[in-house]
Amino acid sequence: MDVREQLLAPFATEDIEWRIQRAGAARDGEVWAMLAPYITARGVQERLDEVFGLGGWEVSYRPWEVGHPGVLCTLRVRDPETGMWVVREDGAEQPETEPVKGGFSNALKRAAVQFGIGRYLYGIGTVYAEVSAEKREGYQRGEFRDKKSGETHRFYWAVPAWAVARVSAPAGEDALARPGPRVAEPAPAPGAPSPPCPRCTGPMWDNRANKRSPRAPDWRCKDKECGGVYWPGQAPPPEDALLEPARSA
């Protein structure tokens, strides 16, 4: 496996974290949340060690501000074949929570993407979380505030098993040994609720069993005037949801 293939290889489950991108409530009051996968800074460092060796890469940081305080990361790696140093840079804003640590970590991850590390995650898109009103094993707590009513909704969420399998290297196997798996979202159990429409958050028709073209959407909004459609793992967050971004607790 050449250097490029090693850099582009998928990550193990423990090196990927999921964050809520948007959350809200459907018209019937059912809470939904959309997640996106991210690599961890530790995973990036281990990948650099594996590919280039302990002395084969260097990183430096400096303040960077474009409207908001941030950090610019300069990542240098030495090509194992030519011995030449290759440099990439990228930056990130400092988050409100742990601004110093978060700024450094996010800048490193963005710079690493310039070399292809974790780049495949951008093609995953967002996925709907498994949501529960009650605390369950393996679930995390989340919340969002409705801008209309000002009410704060608290809930618990987990990453669907099919989504974990889709972005992770198989358990017990070296992440550099094979390309990332592509696992489709399973069909819901009979009587299971449909995902909320990405546009109006209303109910949707399951179109998977009847569609004639693979390019047709898997789900269609029941409201013909809305016209919302959804492909699992690829739907964008609702554009017109009157909600603040959700956060994990």
Image: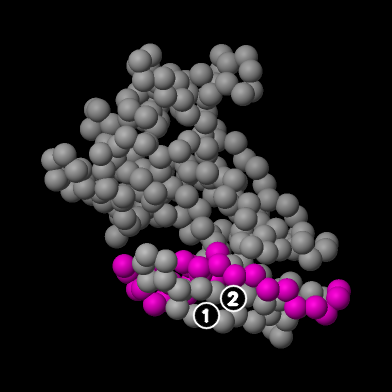
Q: Secondary structure at mark 1?
A: strand
- Residue at 38% over, 14% down: 224
Is the C terminus in the top left, top right, bottom left or bottom right quadrant?
Answer: bottom left
| Residue ranking furthest to the right | 81
- Residue at 31% over, 55% down: 247
Q: Amino acid at mark 1?
A: Tyr
Q: Is residue 229 left or right of residue 166?
A: left
Q: Which residues are magenta?
A: 81-110
Taking depth in this image into account, of 109 and 140 the one nearest to the observer is 109
- Residue at 50% over, 53% down: 37
Q: Is residue 146 visible?
A: yes
Disc 2 + disc 1, Cβ < 8 Å: yes
Q: Amino acid at mark 2?
A: Thr
> Label 2, on which residue?
74
Quick one: label 1, few (<14), some, or many (20+) residues within 10 Å? Answer: some
134 in relation to 14, above or below:
above
> Label 1, on which residue?
61
Q: Is residue 89 magenta?
A: yes
Taking depth in this image into account, of 70 and 248 the one nearest to the observer is 70
| Residue ranking furthest to the bottom | 55
Residue 43 x, y percent position in the rendering? 58, 68
Gap between marks 2 and 1 measured at Cα: 6 Å
